[in-house]
């Protein structure tokens, strides 16, 4: 079906072989995947020459999460998902055939990129002012929406951000350092109403264990969770939540790579393959048409 992008975790893993790596991976994906300093992460190379390095070594390392349909890591270590699949396809047109994934929480993606632990982020890391100041985003690949995951029947009737700010006893689970935590902060919802969780599964458990009244996450991520475990239900896209969008994120100094990538991405978006990848992961490819990074970088937070 799809080309495989191999997860590179630590040097150790490579010698164990894929099957054992798969077992190891499955057990520990929620934890931040550390990359051996100097060995595993983005290989050396001066600031701003990541394009040349990628062309030379034949791959770039990519910071990813494990939150389908944005990113999905299989037991055999291969990485899929809308964002890595588009990144890989576009880089291939630029002569860089491989991507090596490093799994990390959203809050660690930008610090890791700027610390040279990976070369690019492709995980559905949504654009907003603070992030656009810290990294150089490509033009958007995905535009998406946010929803609440609630107990069946949505007993508290939580459907909007306003519902949360008007009900101080409502508790909302959000990923630490995630875009959704930013939404609540921008809406001035007190920390006391926020239940910070480390990943999507923990967010769902916070709701089913009544530690939170709802879990705020992208609509399609919640739907993917419910496919596995229907113990929560997903509200319609939240009308008063900001529009979200994402693309590949590079270090600011990688201006050549960004320029070359945006040029190749613009061409790739005209191909049926682009629409096929997004559709396959449940995204409507027409929604991103005409949307720019400049526009999405205006999102507060
Ligand atoms: O950009 C973010 O921080 C959010 N993006 C996704 C795809 N899931 C949750 C995360 O908080």
Image (cartoon, helix red, strand yellow):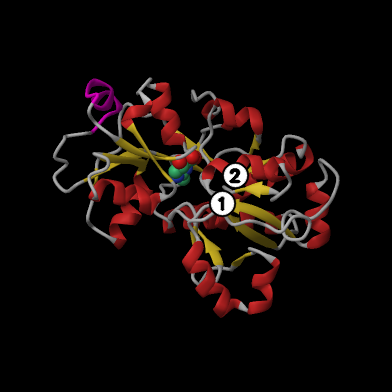
Kindly identify the residue that appears in the image at 68 percent across and 56 percent down.
61
Observer able to see residue 248: yes
Q: Do the residues labelled 2 and 1 touch (CB within 8 Å)?
A: yes
- Residue range in magenta is 159-168
- Assign a secondary structure to mark 1: loop
Identify the disc placed on residue 109.
2
Q: Is residue 210 left or right of residue 220?
A: left
Tell me: 190 left or right of 136.
left
Question: Mark 1 packing: few (<14 Cα in 10 Å), some, or many (20+)?
Answer: many
In front of the other: 195 or 87: 195
Residue appearing at x 69%, y 63% in the figure: 98
| Magenta segment main secondary structure | helix
Q: Tell me the SS state at disc 2.
A: helix
The residue indicated by pointer 1 is 104
Up/down of 8 relative to 293, above or below: below
| 149 relative to 263 in the view: left or right | left
Residue 70: percent from left, percent from top? 47, 51
- Residue 260 within the magenta-colored segment of the rendering: no
Q: Residue 299 appears at what percent x and percent y?
A: 49, 25
Between discs 2 and 1, the one toward the N terminus: 1
**The residue positioned farthest toward the right in the image shown:** 46
Q: What residue is at 16 percent from the left and 48 percent from the top?
A: 152
């Amino acid at each position: 079906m799809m080309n495989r992008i191999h997860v590179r975790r630590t040097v150790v893993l490579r010698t164990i072989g894929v099957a054992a790596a798969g077992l190891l991976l499955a057990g520990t994906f929620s934890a931040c995947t550390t990359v051996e300093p100097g060995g595993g992460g983005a290989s050396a190379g001066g600031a701003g020459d990541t394009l040349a390095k990628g062309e030379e070594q034949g791959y770039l390392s990519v910071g990813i999460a494990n939150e389908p349909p944005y990113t999905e890591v299989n037991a055999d270590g291969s990485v899929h998902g809308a964002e890595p699949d588009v990144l890989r396809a576009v880089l291939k047109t630029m002569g860089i055939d491989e991507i090596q994934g490093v799994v990390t929480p959203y809050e660690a993606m930008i610090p890791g990129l700027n610390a040279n632990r990976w070369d690019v982020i492709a995980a559905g890391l949504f654009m907003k002012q603070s992030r656009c100041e810290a990294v150089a985003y490509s033009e958007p690949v995905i535009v998406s929406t946010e929803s609440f995951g609630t107990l069946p029947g949505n007993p508290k009737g939580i459907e909007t951000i306003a519902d949360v700010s008007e009900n101080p006893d409502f508790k909302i689970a959000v990923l630490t350092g995630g875009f959704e935590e930013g939404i609540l902060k921008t809406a001035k919802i007190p920390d006391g109403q926020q239940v910070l969780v480390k990943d999507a599964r923990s967010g769902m458990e916070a709701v089913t264990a009544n530690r939170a009244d709802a879990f705020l996450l992208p609509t399609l991520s919640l739907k993917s969770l419910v496919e596995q475990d229907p113990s929560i239900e997903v509200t319609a896209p939240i009308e008063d939540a900001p529009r979200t969008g994402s693309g590949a994120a590079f270090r600011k100094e990688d201006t050549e790579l960004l320029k070359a990538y945006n040029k190749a991405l613009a061409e790739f978006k005209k191909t049926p393959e682009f629409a096929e990848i997004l559709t396959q992961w449940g995204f409507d490819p027409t929604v991103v048409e005409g949307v720019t990074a400049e526009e999405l970088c205006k999102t507060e937070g």
